[in-house]
Amino acid sequence: MELPRNSVWTVKDSGSIEDGQYRLLDVMEDVESVVLYPLLNTSTTARPLAVSLEVFLELVSSRKAKKSKYVLPAYLLVDEESISAEHIVRRDKNYKLVKGIVSDRSFIFDYSTQRRSLQLAKYAKEVGVDRKSLARLLTQYWRYGQNKMALLPAFSNSGGAGKEKSPNSTPLGAPKQPRTIAVERAAKYIVREKDKRHFKKAIKKYHLKESGLSLAKTYDNLLKDSYSKEVAFAKACNRTPSVPTPKQFKYWYSKLFSQEQIIKGRTSENNYLRNKRGVLGSITDRSYLPGTHFEIDATVADVHIVSELGAQYVLGRPTIYIVADRASRMVVGMHVSLYHASWRAARQALVNCFLPKSAYCKSFGVSIEDSEWPCAHIPAELVCDNGEMIGVKPNEALTPMTELSFTPPYRPDCKGVVEKRFDILNKEVIHELSGTTRGGQVIRGSRDPRKDAIYTLKEVTAEIIKAVREHNSSILDNLAFSSPLLIENDLTPTPLNYWKIHISKHKHELQSANSDEVIARLLPSAEVSMTRSGIHFNGMYYSCAEVEELNLASVARSSGQWRLEARIDENTTNYIYVRLDKNKGFTRCHLLPRSRMLANKSMFESAFIKDWLDTKKELTPITTTSIEDHKHRQEVTRNAKRRNTDAEKVTFKDKISNIRQRRKEELSATTNVLASSLGDSTRDETLEPPSNDDKVISLPKGRKRRTGRGES
């Protein structure tokens, strides 16, 4: 059995040796003994003891003696270079004193077996040191490992460091020193246990609270609550009150309460967990495979935009949705719209996440291959906050495809990957655009960023797409420590490489997405109308090959229009998905040329036109001319009714008889009136009656109509 020199053993229930911890100093086979030093003996001159080798081996075999560990003091666990020169001199001097005797095995055996050691006294006389001092050095040498470092001076605990003092009549610390001899300072106050209780009570009551008082204000309240009588009595006696000083109060504040208690007491639980707790782990520790967790969140973009239909119309700040893979830091989906954070906008981001990206990027003028952004998958778990995703509709739409998990309220750190992507996008692209708010960092009196807005929603989205692609190809140092596959295959640690290599090695939690299912479940539903001009939605007309083959527009013209179920991609007006038959899936219908004004725009622009039209209608519900015409018409009606009073005496038969003759007479009378109102020259030139030589051309007559019974 191995009994290494300097090993530590714990002995229990041996019967022959007192229970405790021992250091094995030496094994002396010539006398069949082991020399043990008792580590738990606190005496500065404790002696080792010799035990029979056979007895000790029996204790070890019966497991009454077990190997253990002795923790050395901190001042011994230092590097040689960090020890001061003064301590090195002391150490080397002490080691010289014991070096000649600790190597003498006969001395060690005699010292451990005999009550009096003449050899120790003799050696002490030779080296010129007191016998007891030498015994103390030997104790220190054996206790701390039998090497030179064991004899380092233990000055780290000098002065009773870490021990609380209890003053009686003399205050601790230096006395108060006046700056000049002309002023005499008051006596120093002695803080006792009663004062400490007052300190604790005041600190808990006023300071260790969320939005608690400052330490100075807490000290004032301490004096008011616990020392008011002393202050009042001292004022009456015209002397300095005997109360703790602010310096003493601050000292005991740090002594009575740990730093952790102070931090937790001065803030709310949510703020502590979010901003002040220790961060020993990461949310990516258990999510190193792509697709294990996708995180989704939204933020309002730090830039104002304008309408594509008129740059003078500022539309405000759009909302950005980002879906990020926790393991690879890959941005796997996005959506930019003018809708606030809601299920309506979130579902668009998820559609973008689950479907290929090339068509989406092309609609914003960015041409890519699917391999450049190869994210068209459903994750094992979708992490979201307690917002728009906690409703019934998101749960019904998403739970058949993936599992939803929700972070605690006010804990954005639980989905820190997607939160960091927003910060990256702001720094890389958004804060460089004209019209940016720079995260609200607006100096008073500075120019309103809305005055500088020049970009449309489509242009901002295109810039964000480019920034996302750049991020997915950028080097992230942390990825190199997340998986060995990057190093094994000599790949740059980028999100794109991390994603591709894990998929190629089949190390992921991704699911393939069915495009028809994604469109049917996640895109916003709407009702469209089949009309004679095509499928009508929000002022725009769409059609497809099936509509033209079945000639549905002609059917709608003859039989009347009907309603159809549709799914709307709010990123573009170029197409919608319509269910032409209730027993079939959705068919993609494209925008017709008659609606070309809204081509290549977002659905919000069509809504903007309707809002613009409504404002124009509200501005002029009727014209001022129509009001005047209406009043004139009413006046004419009243005059006509007054004029018709005498005509009521004539019978209806007389009213309608000789209509043709009366028309001729009326025409002649009206013409004469017009002619008489003009000047002579005008009458001679323009109204000169035609000569008999003029040729009269008869106009074609219509079919002769039958006259009524009343006509003659």
Image (cartoon, rainbow, N blue to C red):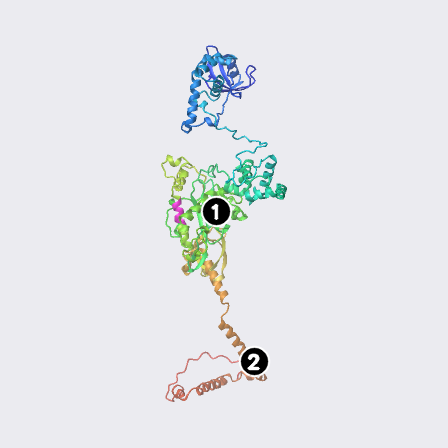
The kind of residue on which mark 2 rests is Lys
Foreground: 92 or 529? 92
Residue 641 bears which disc, if any? 2
Q: Secondary structure at mark 1?
A: strand
Foreground: 390 or 11? 11
Q: Secondary structure at mark 2?
A: helix
Residue 48 bears which disc, if any? none
* Residue displayed at 42% across by 24% down: 89
User: The magenta stretch spans which residues?
Assistant: 464-471
Please rate how many residues cluster around mark 1, counting C-alpha atoms within 10 Å: few if below 14, some from 14 to 19, many from 20: many
The spot of residue 216 in percent (x, y) is 55, 43
* Residue displayed at 38% across by 52% down: 365
Foreground: 215 or 429? 215
Which residue has dot 1 on it? 297
Q: Is residue 365 above or below residue 40?
A: below
Queried whether the magenta region covers residue 466, the answer comes back as yes
Tell me how far mark 1 sits from mark 2, CA to CA. 73 Å
Q: Is residue 212 visible?
A: no
* Residue displayed at 54% across by 48% down: 391
Residue farthest to the top, as pictured: 30
The spot of residue 25 in percent (x, y) is 47, 17
The spot of residue 169 in percent (x, y) is 59, 32
Give the number of the mark in front: 1 or 2. 1
Magenta span: predominant SS is helix
Please rate how many residues cluster around mark 2, counting C-alpha atoms within 10 Å: few if below 14, some from 14 to 19, many from 20: few
Q: Is residue 176 above or below residue 528?
A: above
Tag 2 or tag 1, which sits nearer the N-term? 1
Residue farthest to the front, as pictured: 182
The spot of residue 531 in percent (x, y) is 47, 60
